[in-house]
Image (tube, helix red, strand yellow):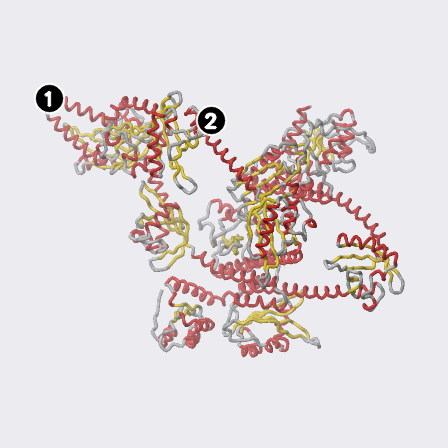
Amino acid sequence: MQISIAETVEKGLEYCQKNEFDVIILNPLVPNLKRLRFVEKLEKIQKNTPIIVLSESQQKDKAKQTIKRGVRDDLIKEKLTSEQLFQAIETVIPENNHFQTVEYLEPYNRFIKTVNRRIFQGEKLETILQKTADDLRKILDCDRVLFYQYSRVNFPQKLVQSVNNKTPKIDNFNPTDFGMYSDKQRVVADIYKEKLTANNIKNLEKNKVKSYLAFPVIIPSESPQSLEKFGLLIAQDCEKFRDWTPKEIDLFEQLSLQVSIAIKQEQLSEKIEKLNTQLETQTRESDQQIQALLNNTFQCTGLLTPDGILLDVNQTALDLGGLKREDTINRPFWETYWWTISPETQNQLRESIAKAALGESIYYEVDVLTAGGKVATTDFALRPLTNETGEIVLLIAESRDISDRIEAKRALEENQILLQSVLDCIPQGVFWKDKQGNFLGCNYQFTVDAGLSSLEEIIGKTDYDMPWKEEAKLYRADDHQVMRSGEAKLNIEEPMTKVGKISRLLRTHKMPLRNADREIIGVVGTYEDITERKQAEIALRRSEARYQMLVDNFPNGAVFMFNHELRYILVGGFGLAEVGLSKELLEGKTIWEALPSETYELIEPLYRRTLAGEQMVEELPFGDHLYLVYFLPIIEQGTVQAGVVLTQDITQRKQAEQKLQKLNQELEARVQQRTADLEVEIAQRTRLLNILEASLNEIYIFDAETLKFQYANQGALKNLGYSLEELQQITAINLKPQLTPEQFQKLIDPLLNHQQEKTIFRAAYQRANKTLYPVEVHFQLIEHQQERLFLAVALDITERQQTEERLRLVEFALDNAQESVFIFDKEGQIVYVNKTACESLGYSSTELSNLKIWQIDENLNSPPHWEPFCQYLKRQKSLLLESTHHTQSGVVIPVEITLTELNFHGVPYFCEIARDIRERKQAEIALQKRDNYLTALVEVQRQLLSATSQNNLYELVLSLLGQAANASQVYVFEHCYDEFQRPYLYYMSHWSAPDATSRLNRSVLQQLYDTPCFLPWIEQMNQGEAICQSLDGMTSEQREILEPAGISTVLLFPLIVKGEFFGLIGFDNDEDDRQWDEAEISLLAAAVSAIALATERQLAQEQLKRQLTAIEAASEGIAITNPMGDYIYLNKAHLELFGYTDASEILNRHWKTLYDPEEADRIEREAISKLMEKGYTLCEAVATRKDGSTYLQEFSLTLTSSGEIVCVCRDITERKRAEDQLRRTNAQLERATRLKDEFMANMSHELRTPLYSILGLSEVLQQGVYGYLNAEQLRSLSTIEQSGQHLLELINDILDLSKIESGKMELQLGAVNITQLCKSSLNFVKPQADQKNLQLRLIAEEIPVTLEIDERRIRQVLINLLSNAVKFTPEGGNIVLKVEIDREKACVHLSVIDTGIGIAAEDQVQLFEPFVQIDSSLSRRYSGTGLGLALVRQITQMHSGTVSLESEVGKGSTFTVTLPWNTTVVGEEGELFSSTNAGNEGIKNERSTWIEPTFLNSSFEGCPTLLIAEDNKANAETVADYLGTRGYRVIFAENGLEAVEYAQQYQPQLIVIDISMPLLDGLEAIRQIRTHRDTAEIPIIVLTASAGCKDRDKCLQAGANDYMSKPISLKLLSDKIKQRLNQQ
């Protein structure tokens, strides 16, 4: 990077004239600098170079002016960091480069504008995607363009394709199969040069793809500051390899942004529409909801005067006392039924009311009377309510039944009993004492050891009262130590004398016993009997002597024997002393006491695996030695008694050479000695041979001249597979076939010539069976008595080579990973980096190894905070966070790092894996801008919904849009016509930015109509198109009008209301050549569309108000009389009904004067008396007009609180004439109802019939009837089957709800075991619960009486509630089905309790309504129709029961179904159904010719023959194919007549028949089959799409043996057929 610095204004301008810069940084404190004038000069010299200004904090106003002049950024120096400055430079440089290339991208820009216009015009998303794919393919001249949408909640997986004539479309597209991913861009010029898998290449070749572009489409998610991966945009070239140009890649990036805008706009439109609907519904139902909320609260609420008179009370309080409202209202509160429990309670209430009337809030608990004379404990509150002046005007009384607290106390006692039961099941003894040593309690095992008959006997006794009184003093000492220290004492081995003077050895654990305040009040202990284990250890020690001699003389290593406590019980071997150990230091001590921490941490897991019975061989370090260690378990009588470790020191490379050389010298010296030394020499040779034989290495001696073997130890012979005699027949070269004689001679010549004392090399030895294995060979020349021999020591390095190969593979993988990998020690020193890290940071691996990790990653704490950070990382094990890396050149790279603790041979290290996230950060910045717009749009919509008038509507949203768009001003004008029908713009509202220099000029905008140069703009807006123009793009006439007004850029959107041009919303900028991008225009267009909708709604509301006024003026006759019956008010319609025109003619007259005397008396007698009784009445009468004529009148009377009567009347003469017509209409409605029932029955059949084929064929294919399927096919079939089952459940719910609402559902009541019913319901939802790791429990009380219910329907209720609980409970939660009885109310409560998401109180009222789910976000996360809870309530109410709900958001819900029980026990049930045969009446078989049946699988001759009667051939073929695989021969009948005829003709072993068939229905066909002697006993299974119990009864009564509802399980049908045939 080249940097030029100018210290003066003149020097800076001179540099800019000579050079072209990528960015200019300006300091306003340079002498003689006037920033605005300097910026203008720079723009003339270097027009497109971005400028960044470094300002002082007090220069904010000037900073805004320079920004408007074209400066890209203005930074405050006092708060500026180097990182922020660098980031600002990086941001503006790409913008500048983009500006320079715009002129080359004009075709692409037109295409982007076309896409944007489609989005603005509100086309459907699918249409936009298809058109865009077609256009993009043509522009890029590629073969195939795809848009792939991932499967999401409420958005199924989609694939939009566009291909040319030569290219086929892709089926079953999966991005990962093609090497395309949702989180990164892929630019592939040649698929064979990219890092693609073999499977990727295969799939690409299959679809003829040679190169492709793939960009992710990302949209903001519902949660803030997060993104959602929506799909992929893909272009493919199939004819040739292609280098995609930067222009094409940039077009793809812009297009992916436009697609994401279209997606978000459609989502926003749906959300706005839903919000509008919700607002209208809430406005309409608010009053009812408030009243319903008061009446359905769980607490009792009442309103009182300050004197204590009860004014109102909610339904909960009335239900509590079993009262009616009229029994309580306008009475002293203390005289109401609840408080009559005692005079004391009434006096206390009167005193409380008096205190509350003085401003005091009262709270206390009190017993009150409830329904049936029962007593309930409540928490009662009395609070004063004041008006604006502080005067107490009302008292509010609230209470809640807290009787459940008593029940909770009982439950606590039950829990204590349960805890004691658990303790009694523990095989160890458990006890607890106080500080004085008195026993407070124990478990059952303790009483057995103490010889006590019950737990109560132990209370108050001490250890001195027990059979172990001799050991009591020892026990008390331990107790005192635990209570004094406050810490647990574990693994105490101590004796115990049990009852019967039986001595045992115990292992005891004791810890302090604390109370709720954490104070020590005693000690609690557990113990277990370890007598047998100790006896086994003693037996083990007895066997130690057998091994002692072997252990003490173990060569070149050591032997260790240890017990289950990891305590050494036998140690020996020559190798101990070499590492500073001895038998005395180890025996009797544990590994933690005898060995350093790095050693026992390494061997502890290996010791435990050995004690588990596992044999192992490991290489382990100790000090500066390396040992080959054998781990062997000692097993006696099937039990591991101890473990043995054998070690061999294999660090003998140089040590062994030195020892061998010394041994050779000693041998030479001894050869020269006399015969007297011969015996000593022989002994030493014998000892040497023993060492050689015992060595785990391969040792050879061969002649230096002939190379023939003279000696080999047992290890060598065993590995090679030779005997010593066989080995002596070959030479050393024969073991190394990969070496030629010349190569081998060259290897040993330096030894023969005494140039080297020894040589080490690697080779591959060949065994006797011709297999090879790698070895490391040490050669040394031995000259003895003029004999020259070679001593060769070979070590099998198979495992070492495998390890080295794996290490090389790991290093290769790390160097080729895309992420940077750092490994550093606990001091922060970098010890390893991979190749990617070096390339990313610009360092060599050597340079990085000399740095600390915080020098690269500054977010990692340097000293002194480094140690706490390391400790924190050790506790967390792994951390994922974002940070920055600094390259050698000073560039800051944002990264996502994963930190992990490593433990290598006891030494702690840390690993950092870093991923470069610069591209992701840039995408997040781009999306943040778009998200700000979307946030503003949501707020605009919210403000629009709260607007009360049209002017208020605009004022609320213009400021939001102006700030979001960074505009100078925003304005709204309405399109109007004057009296001469000339158009003009009427000002509505506007907003201006505080620093805007231009101001609204109405005359300028008026010229849009008056000036011909603006006519094209008017035409565009009339067609719904937006106008976006800057001064440079305007005509000279337009510029002459707008430039003097200070407007540099204008953006106009038409307001389209009810399909017509209503007005415009404009945005403009002053002194700024603002470039509005397509995304901004699209988002602002969406906001304008929302304003248009709100405008349309406001206009409709105003129109509605005018209509309401007109309706009230022309409504029915309304009159009001005083308590004496004299008229005090009449409206015009009332006067007209009676033939009057002036109200004064009737005012102050009695109402009876308008009626015939007899008719008036009847009204007095029938209507007025009823009015006085109930306060309201509806009546008919014959009224007399002023002219004496009469008419039939209907009137309603309402009595007000002041005694006045409100009369609303109408002329019903015509209505009476229409009653005859109404009766005829009712008859038609009854017929329509009947037709509806028939339609529902037909719908049941028609919907289930195709499901029959779908589910049947799915089952056939999954069971491999037509051959085996691969995993993808099986998964697809499983999806089909699950979707079919879901659709079937939906059909059942809709039909059930329809039956209930029409009163057609009848309950099949019977005696039911409610506990078994609950268990079966839990089993039904258990698979779904297991998938989410949910715990299911049943808590059931014993039911003393029989419940007579419809078992199927109540099971449906429980499964619906349990399924909802599983659906809305997060993973790992709990679900409880609780059965409780209420003997007083003679009912049973079935409660489903979950720990799910909970339900807000305001949502609970509408929860049980059909098709209602409480929140749209839930409907996206959780599937469902909203019918389940509606069915639950309806079915429960049919059983005279109730459903209630208690819930708290975030904690869970409790749904309780309450059912009444029967006090009589139902007797044993007899046969529910019996087969009846009907005569073959009414239908005769008029066929005279013999019909040849259809055999669907005629190849099964000799197999059982089945007759399938089904009018749907697809269903019949599905069943026949499946049954054919089970060995049946199937005949197909298309109607009922054929079924009867084929049954008589072929007499099959079994008949499967559908109910709904042409010519003759299934029921009549069954009756005819049963009347024929030859077919009367053939088993018949009925299939029907109807699901009602009545249908089942009809089938069985007609003569069927079994009944199945469509769609059926083919396996279940096959099982039923097999069962029926076996019964025959």
Residue receiving disc 1: 676
Residue type at the position of mark 2: Ser
> Where residue 1229 sits: x, y (%)?
79, 48
Q: Quadrant of the N terminus?
A: bottom left
Q: Which of 46 and 319 is in front in this view?
A: 319
- Dot 1 alpha-carbon crowd within 10 angstroms: few under 14, some 14 to 19, many 20 or more: few
**In the image shown, does 182 or 1228 lie closer to the viewer?**
1228
Residue 770 seen from this side: no
Q: Quadrant of residue 472?
A: top left
| Crowding near the residue tagged with mark 2, few <14, some 14–19, many ≥20 C-alpha atoms within 10 Å | few
Q: In this view, does 632 lie above or below 1182?
A: above
Question: Outermost residue toward the right?
Answer: 1188
- Which element type, helix, strand or loop, lies under badge 1? helix
598 or 1500: nearer the eye? 598
Disc 2 target residue: 454
| Left or right, 1148 with reference to 1427 | right
At 64% from the left edge and 45% from the top edge, which residue is drawn? 340
Instruction: Give the amino acid at mark 1.
Output: Ala
